[in-house]
Amino acid sequence: MKKILILGAKGNLGGQLIKVFSKKNEVIAWDREEIDITDKELIYKKVSDIKPDIIINAAAYNAVDKCEEDENEFELAKKLNCQAVGYLAEAAISVNSILVHYSSDYVFGGHANKTNSEQIKRIKKQGGFKEDDNPDPVNKYGESKFMGERELISRSGKGLKWYLIRTSKLFGPKGESEVAKPSFFDIMLKLAKEKEVLDVVDEEMSCFTYTPDLAKATRKLIESDMGYGIYHIVNEGPCAWYQAAKELFGIAGINITVNPVSGDKFPRPAKRPSYSVLLNTKFEQLRSWQEALREYLKIKNL
Ligand SMILES: NC(=O)c1ccc[n+]([C@@H]2O[C@H](COP(=O)([O-])OP(=O)(O)OC[C@H]3O[C@@H](n4cnc5c(N)ncnc54)[C@H](OP(=O)(O)O)[C@@H]3O)[C@@H](O)[C@H]2O)c1
């Protein structure tokens, strides 16, 4: 039995990690009431008190648009997504814990926005961004996540045992936090109750990921003898938002007209990557997102 510290326990992924890891381990689940992960001294103290075998960090700053517009918010994003990762890494080294941290497909995407980019042609041809492709974020949130990745990777040679799991477009049961973000599918289901016609952006190719699948894959990865390093864990089959909405309403048997529109129709402060498909070349493939979505709708009685 291992002692596992889960941070961001009330978040969307955090809740699923608790479920999966509690089966065979001693789980200590903390959210911001128990620890503010931007507080360096508190992290060192609390981690050295409990000496976990594994620290799983699912806490993050995720307000993509807010931190694009407001410098103070960007500072907060960097504190949570970057500096806190460094504190956790140092604390993990000091008690010899393994550190698991999550990053995002949004560390990629800048490639596609550069005219005549040969790189993006190569990436699309290979089926997405591989684990060792160079990040190039298009927005400040992506920048903060990339900075966090470097906090982890730079401690590789200093004795840190780490897994960096990049994932994208999470969906699944909502976390316990009152402010946990609803997923795209939950937003679409809510809108379908209010409208008969929906305009949905037919852009931003990337992969959906079902949080219960990601939590199980995280456990499998840790229990495997695969080496430390970067992993891409997503459900199979890239798609844009429009296709996802069509599939959702098809499976749920909801009769609604869905129109594909360009991203210009819904201007937002932060640019989104037009292509940020994560290619998983190291870990076993997860099931398709459609299959995972069917399971999610079943547990919602749809
Ligand atoms: N959501 C996605 O589509 C997506 C896509 C790609 C990658 N990811 C990554 O996947 C991971 C999990 O994401 P998620 O969507 O499950 O996140 P989430 O639902 O936003 O959960 C994050 C949790 O961290 C807590 N938290 C915030 N600030 C904290 C602090 N200073 N100290 C301690 N806890 C704090 C939050 O509390 P409050 O709720 O009270 O703020 C929340 O419970 C993150 O690393 C995220 O960047 C997510």
Image (cartoon, grey):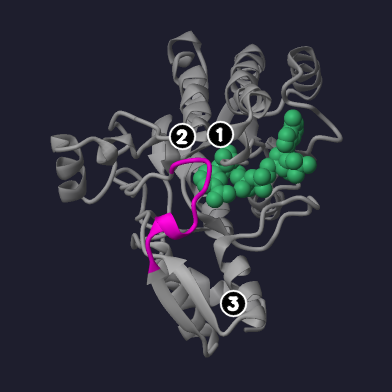
Q: Residue 134: x and y, percent?
A: 30, 28
Tell which circle, 2 or 3, labels the residue nearer the N-terminal end. Answer: 2
Residue picked out by circle 1:
68
Q: Quadrant of the C terminus?
A: bottom right
Question: Which circle marks residue 139 in the picture?
Answer: 2
Q: How many marks?
A: 3
Residue at x-position 59% and y-position 33%: 69
Foreground tag (1 vs 3): 1
Which residue type carries mark 3? Leu
Which residue type carries mark 2? Asn
Look at the image and tell me whether residue 107 can be seen. yes
Q: Residue 215: x and y, percent?
A: 57, 51
Tell which circle, 1 or 3, labels the residue nearer the N-terminal end. Answer: 1
Q: Quadrant of the N terminus?
A: top right
Most extreme residue toward the top, as rendered? Answer: 158
Residue picked out by circle 3:
297
- Mark 2 lies on a secondary structure that is loop
Q: Is residue 282 above or below residue 67?
A: below
Q: Is residue 198 above or below residue 101?
A: below
